[in-house]
Amino acid sequence: MSQLQTFFVTTPIYYVNDRPHIGHVYTTVAADVMARFNRLDGKEVFFLTGSDEHGQKVERSAEARGIAPIALADEVVAEYASLWERFEISFDRFIRTTEPGHKEAVKAIFQRLTASGTLYKGSYEDWYCTPCESFWTETQIRNGLCPDCARPVERLAEESYFFALSRYTQPLIDHIESHPEFIGPESRRNEVLAFLKNEEGLRDLSVSRTGFTWGIPVPGDDKHLIYVWIDALTNYLSALGYPDQEGSMGRFWPPSLHLIGKDILRFHAIYWPAMLMAADLPLPKRLYAHGWWTVEGEKMSKSKGNVVRPDDLLAKYPPDVIRYFMLRDVPFGGDGDYSQASLDMRYTTELANDLGNLAQRVLSMAVKQFGGIPSRSQAMENDEAALLATLLRSRDEVRAQIEVQAFHKALGAIWQVVGEANRFIDATAPWALAKQADQRGRLAGVLLSAMETIRGVAILLLPFMPTMAGKILQQMGEEIPDTRRGSCAGLDLLVGEPRLSQGKTLDKPVGVFPRLG
Ligand code: MSP
């Protein structure tokens, strides 16, 4: 029996000391599009997201609120869960780093690194501020004073575990150079290479912390907690059942794609592959670092009070519209600016006018003239064939662009078809054909070809706008390929002969894109 090709996609796991904002939605929606598109393309997908719950920051935030860290985590995780439901995020697994299985996996990795001789106990020396209980580097201190409280710092050595990262400078360079697709976009890849090639090379990494308790203890030495980034990165393994190498690990490892923001590139492009090399595990095939959102031209920050909260957006726009906007407005690798004006503009011109009106006018005419899907009674004319050929070409273009996370280009390719279809309708003028008794055959052909095209567009749009694209298909009496689970090979349906059931009766269509209030 031939096995389906697999596709394993991840988001970062989000900290629980902050509430979700559009930045978190952005990565997760992009991962959802990757997951849904690959399911539609016949692959078996594993889509992983989750929460990063340990560390001193979480311990402190919980303390400040007078609750236990796990209570804080539960609260924020519940908020993510409901948010992902509203955005129709089709993850297969939501991992929490406080799960017992995850903790076991982190300990197992720590032991694996120890066994491979890449982990050792040493001493960490830096500037220490006793009142703040914090270590600072030479460049962080200000004239011999703590950058936080401005009191004197002292030189202090602390026992710590180290990962022998320095040994991996050259192996990482070699890997990145021989796998050009490993890091995207290109600019980030160059940034990582430049960092690795600087003359000092990498320094060994301190991978344990002391002085707080909310974390996973070093096996056999529980005064030390495992550094939260080692803990967090291991989620990609523990979610598949590591250290058990069979089951999901055997099926899905290595990851096909880690989607991350540019802020956490170094952890994923350097620490993580080095750890995997040390543990003798295959490296992820690709990681892609997207840019950051600003708001009306400014950096989002709590102190400025300009953080865009998903709830506020959802109060104004359907989730699909937000999904569309985020991926359409900005090339995925670059920074983007959220502005309500451009969201409204794109909604009105691209969704409501270009696509919404196209579907509405074609479907209503088909229902009015033929009671549903017209039956073809004469040979297809050249302009119809040309329109359908555009659709097929765009399917290939969309696939190629999604493969390299160029979501804005994939959507651009879909909108080219929408544009062609609108021009086709304007040129063939079905409303005029409807007035000529001898043009019934041509009218049926024109409407049918337009509907086939709209159907194809809706299928290509399913990963981006699952509800709205689904509604368009439903109005044409079509089954909606299920992109939420498993695999459905829906893209195959676009190939070859027209697929709509000719002669089928349809209800009068209802506009899919309402006027915004
Ligand atoms: N817990 C770590 C990740 C561990 S992964 C093994 C973490 N969490 S986080 O809650 O801070 O979320 C980080 C991610 O949120 C970023 O990588 C990025 O994907 C996203 N964003 C946070 N702010 C953002 C913007 N302003 N704009 C776009 N995305 C941003 O780091």
Image (cartoon, helix red, strand yellow):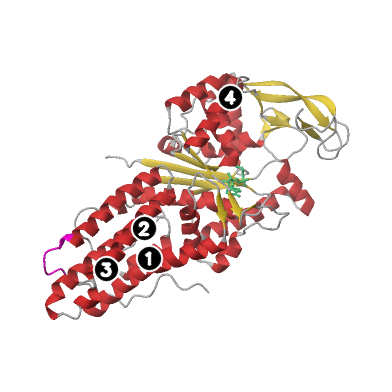
From the image, tell me which residue sits under label 3.
425
> SS for tag 4?
helix
Amino acid type, mark 1 = Asp
Q: Secondary structure at mark 3?
A: helix
Front residue of 238/342: it is 342
**Of helix, strand and loop, which one carries label 2?**
helix
Magenta part, dominant SS: loop
Q: Is residue 43 left or right of residue 385?
A: right
Taking the spot 18% from the left edge, 71% from the top edge, the residue there is 444
Q: Which residues are magenta?
A: 375-382
**Circle on res. 415:** 2
Which comes before the other along the chain, label 1 or label 4? 4
Q: Secondary structure at mark 1?
A: helix
Residues packed near mark 1 inside 10 Å, few (<14), some (14 to 19) or many (20 plus) = some
What type is the residue that disc 3 sits on? Ile
Tell whether circle 2 marks a residue whose Cβ is less than 8 angstroms from ligand 1. Answer: no
Residue 516 in the image: above or below residue 134: below
Tell me the residue that label 1 is attached to.
354
The span from disc 4 to disc 2 (Cα, nearest Å) is 50 Å
Above or below 311: residue 297: above
